[in-house]
Amino acid sequence: MHRNFMILDAMHVFDVHGAAELVYGGILGRLMKRTTLGRNIGYRMTRINIHRIQWYKGRPGKPKLPQIRAGDVVMKNGWHVLHGQLFKAAIVRHASGFFKHLAYTFLNGRGEFEDHMYKLVSSLDDIYFWMYGSLPGDRGRFLSSSERAGLRKAILEFGWHYQWCRGFSRRVHFLGFEVTPTVHKTQHFAMLA
């Protein structure tokens, strides 16, 4: 599998108005409703942004996710999506580690739905590691068989946990984790890996 070919496809399916924005929007939408984070949405967003600042302080040189405002978690046809002029492909891609940290801090171990949200963003972070984890010159132009196996596993786990999150969302009447044609396409990446 040619690494540069996969990067272009991954960008269109995961990064740019793709699955990552739905995952991040779903997580933020749930956090914005958690009263344990604060008495109102403004306070909850402040806490989330404090975690964002602290997380990036420990990672100098990494492209930084801009401040997240409540208005950046938009309702696209009623569904929670992280969207805005500042959230472009490279930023969305580099944000997976922060959202993994956020989900671990506020969601993991707090219920089955929350655990699946953490596992979902963890698998997305793993996908980005296999796709972009190091410069192509560091690992070669083509994915090795072990790299393909790691990527395939991460993609399949992503699909598994995405479906669980969608099911839990439906059960609790939360419009998060919409299954779009782009999300559906993410599942076909496993056949390429």
Image (spheres, grey):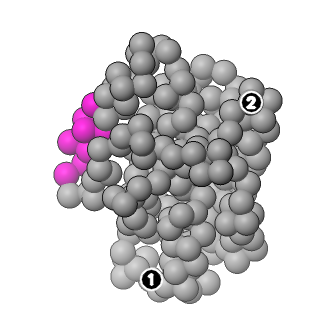
The crowd level at tag 1 (other Cα within 10 Å; few <14, some 14-19, many 20+) is few
Q: Tell me if residue 77 comes above or below residue 151 in the rendering.
A: above
Between 183 and 72, which is closer to the camera in this rendering? 72
Judging depth in this view, the residue of 58 and 146 nearest the camera is 58
Q: How many marks?
A: 2
Percent of width and height locating residue 72: 42, 46
Residue under circle 1?
A: 140
Location of residue 118 in the rendering, given as x and y in whole percent from the top left corner: 57, 37
Kind of residue at badge 1: Gly
Q: Main secondary structure of the magenta part?
A: helix
Residue 86 in percent (x, y) is at 34, 58
Q: Secondary structure at mark 2?
A: loop
Q: Which residues are magenta?
A: 50-60
Is residue 22 in view from this perspective?
A: yes
Q: Is residue 108 magenta?
A: no
Give whichever of discs 2 and 1 has the lower sequence position: 1
Residue in front for this viewpoint, 44 or 139: 44
Image point (42%, 42%), residue name: 71
Which element type, helix, strand or loop, lies under badge 1? Answer: loop
**Quadrant housing the N terminus:** bottom right
- Rendered residue at 71%/60% (across/down): 180
Note whether 17 is above or below 165 in the view shown: below
* Residue bearing the label numbered 2: 173
**Residue at coordinates 31% horizontally, 28% vertically from top-left?**
46
